[in-house]
Amino acid sequence: MPKIHIARNHQSLGAFFQEDVRQGLLSGRFTAGDLAWREGMEEWRPLGEMAPQWEFEIPPPSLASAHGEPAVIHALVASQEGSEPAWEERARIGFFPAILRTMNAVLFRPAATFASLKHTGGLTGPLLYTILLNTTLHTLFGLLSLAGLIMMSGQEFETKIQLLQVQLHALQELSPNFTLSMPALGKPFIESMLLINILLWPAIAVVANFLGAGILHLSLRMVGGANRPFETTFRTICYLCGSFNAVAVALDLIPAVGTAGVLLLLIATLAYLGWYSYASVVAIQQAQSISVLKVVLASVVFTVLGFLVLVALSIILSPLIAGIMKMAGITLGA
């Protein structure tokens, strides 16, 4: 019979025979809140949840905690609330170790991580995690782009604009019925737009996380897959997107120069999209305790609702977009 792997607080306690685990529960070595996995299981599960199936006996509440409550009850509560992610233990384990351990758990152990996700605990912590990773990296690359633009001479800038116009002209030849007129974007205008983007990005990221999580949770409700509240969906989205955003930034570091560079970037991008898609399905499935089919159905509904929201936002913001295009001297026609 395969051994049972036991983990507690993000650390492995080892692999044990079933009888050893049974005795460990009775002696207090293991608790109902410890996570267990053995060959044939799809994901890690709390020992307290697997006890009936494995014919384990959970000892009666005889040991009192510091608050006078049975230790076993605390273990059962822990199994329900979860123990992930490490980010929410940053005060104890340190800021940067908490970020690295959370990223590692989300990227490489999504099933175990989101199966033991804390379903409650507030929205601030997860939002701070994703905003820190998202905004910090976005701001860094934005500042580098802005610095490069500021240091660029007027002649170099004009050369790049001319190259862009040549590419647009080639595009128009492929689509004769579509015209795009871009006389020349001024260097100060682009610098201003970059600066505004950097300053507004944290607010944009906050809105995007709440909006995305809200649409996803509504989609889950529509397919009968919202077994847990919006808070759980929001926390899942924040930890998932925050972790994978760091990987997406790494793709920007790949120099797409020459055939080999473009091919490498294409392969890396496809691998990233596949990896992110898999982790997203697993994360939602485990966090909401639903089937993969319901996750897929919710994803289809999410796509439709997301498209409708984008259309609505485009209509609402069209005066602002038109004003910016007018300032830039951009005109569209068909």
Image (cartoon, grey):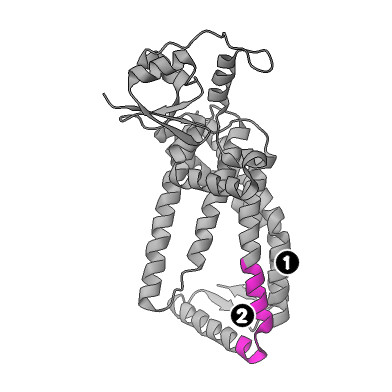
Q: Which span of residues is magenta-colored?
A: 141-158
Q: Residue at x 64, y 42 (%)?
A: 90
Q: Residue at x 49, y 43 (%)?
A: 105
Q: Label 2 belongs to which residue? A: 182
Q: Residue at x 45, y 80 (%)?
A: 173
Q: Is residue 157 magenta?
A: yes
Q: Nearer the viewer, residue 173 or 166?
A: 166
Q: Secondary structure at mark 1?
A: helix
Residue 28 seen in the current view:
yes
Q: CA distance from mark 2 to mark 1?
A: 21 Å
Q: Amino acid at mark 2?
A: Met
Q: Determine whether, in the image, residue 171 is placed left or right of residue 326.
A: left
Residue 304 seen in the current view:
no
317 w.r.t. 123: above or below = below
In the picture, residue 257 is in which quadrant? bottom left
Q: Do the residues bearing badges 2 and 1 touch, measured as CB atoms within 8 Å?
A: no
Q: Residue at x 67, y 18 (%)?
A: 66
137 w.r.t. 26: above or below = below
Name the spot of residue 5 as percent of width and height, x first.
38, 30
Q: Nearer the viewer, residue 328 or 191?
A: 191
Q: Secondary structure at mark 2?
A: loop
Is label 2 or label 1 in front?
1
Name the spot of residue 84 as percent of width and height, x first.
55, 35
Q: Nearer the viewer, residue 26 or 90?
A: 26
Q: Earlier in the sequence, mark 2 or mark 1?
A: 2
